[in-house]
Amino acid sequence: MSGFAGSIVGGIGTLIREYIQSVGFVAGVSGWRISKNGDAEFNNIFVRGTIELPLVASQGEIGTLWWNDGLTVEHAQIFKTLSHVLFMSGGSNNPTLGHDSFIALGEESVAGDDSRLQLSNDGGRSAPNGSEILLDQGIQLFSPSLSAVSTDRGPEIFLGAGELDLVGPGIGGVGWVGVLITASGLTIGAGVSGKYYSEEVSFGGQNIPNAAVTQLVTLSSLHLNSDYGSAWNLVTGVWTCPVSGDYDFTISSAYTGGAVGSRIINRMGTTFNTAPFIGGFDITTPSATMENTVSFTKFIAAGTTLHAEVFQNSGAARLIDTTQSYIKIARRL
């Protein structure tokens, strides 16, 4: 072979020397070398055609890229899984840098053969310091886990078909639903902040006898904005707390006729005309006005039942004014 002092190939064209190399070759620094065993090192390579990696029938490593920056020996692996997902993972032998970042491309989805792209760092969504971006049926952004337990998930953002979901952290796999934004509006999930509840009913039109505590019944709905539906039984006048929390109560009563009395009561209770009462007022000033509003805030446990009571002693039965008499209850978030 021209250009060499001695023969480098045998009669059938096989390399008989251990390697051939350029003048002044220094491994990892300059020049080139082709070894008899098939290994090679070049300075630069420009490929006009196709580079083929070995065929992997089921799963396994396709190839590995190694580089050495003088401090750590780092690598990137390309391999295939049984579910036809191509992984490109990078890492090093430096424990500080770790070796668990990867990119995954494939058709792995519970919904079928759709495309999937997964970018994970430091162990991904289940690791204490990991994070992840997932494109599969939508876009999901995962923040680091809360601990070394894989089910202790960090906050998450999900952009799906027709929705934006902000998911709060989950301990032991159980977290709060978060904030869901869809075409139907905004939903605040159950958990730390809890869901939304605000309801207003009217008790106007009822006839309240003189000097007798009266439970309000036969209510009518004025306003409802709730993730739990209505908490009132409008027929019996009983309110059932939908979820534990702090609630703001407002009771406003007005009587027709402009009469006055020496005592007016508006209050909420659990048992008819029996203390302790949840809140309200009891005015005993002579000539008290027949129009009164009381507001208070109380913590109410889920399932607690309450009702409203009123009292007036103007000297005769009085009709509740329809336009000015209402009960409003709203849960604080």
Image (cartoon, rainbow, N blue to C red):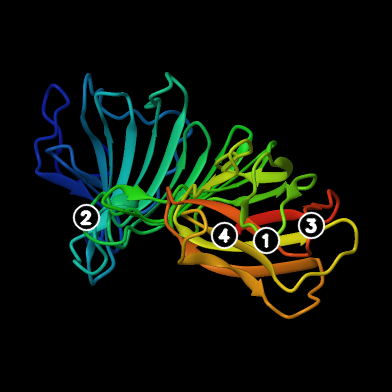
Q: CA distance from mark 3 to mark 2?
A: 69 Å
Farthest residue, direction bottom: 285
Q: Amino acid at mark 3?
A: Ala
* Residue, disc 3: 316
Q: In the rendered structure, which disc, 4 or 3, sits on the residue that comes first in sequence?
A: 4
Q: In the rendered structure, which disc, 3 or 2, sits on the residue that comes first in sequence?
A: 2
* Residue, disc 2: 149
Mark 1 or 4: in front is 1
* Residue, disc 1: 211
Q: CA distance from mark 1 to mark 4?
A: 18 Å
Q: Quadrant of residue 330?
A: bottom right
Label 2 close to label 1 by CB (< 8 Å): no
Mark 4: few, some, or many residues within 10 Å (few <14, many ≥20)? many
Q: Is residue 123 above or below residue 278?
A: above
Mark 1: few, some, or many residues within 10 Å (few <14, many ≥20)? some
Mark 3 or 2: in front is 3
Q: Amino acid at mark 4?
A: Met
Q: Along the line of sight, which residue is nearer the eye, 52 or 234? A: 234
Q: Amino acid at mark 1?
A: Ala
Q: Is residue 60 above or below residue 238?
A: above
Label 3 close to label 2 by CB (< 8 Å): no
Q: In the rendered structure, which disc, 2 or 1, sits on the residue that comes first in sequence?
A: 2
Farthest residue, direction front: 315
Q: Along the line of sight, which residue is nearer the eye, 47 or 86? A: 86
* Residue, disc 4: 268
Label 4: state its secondary structure: strand
Q: Amino acid at mark 2?
A: Val
Mark 2 or 1: in front is 1
Residue 101 seen by the camera:
no
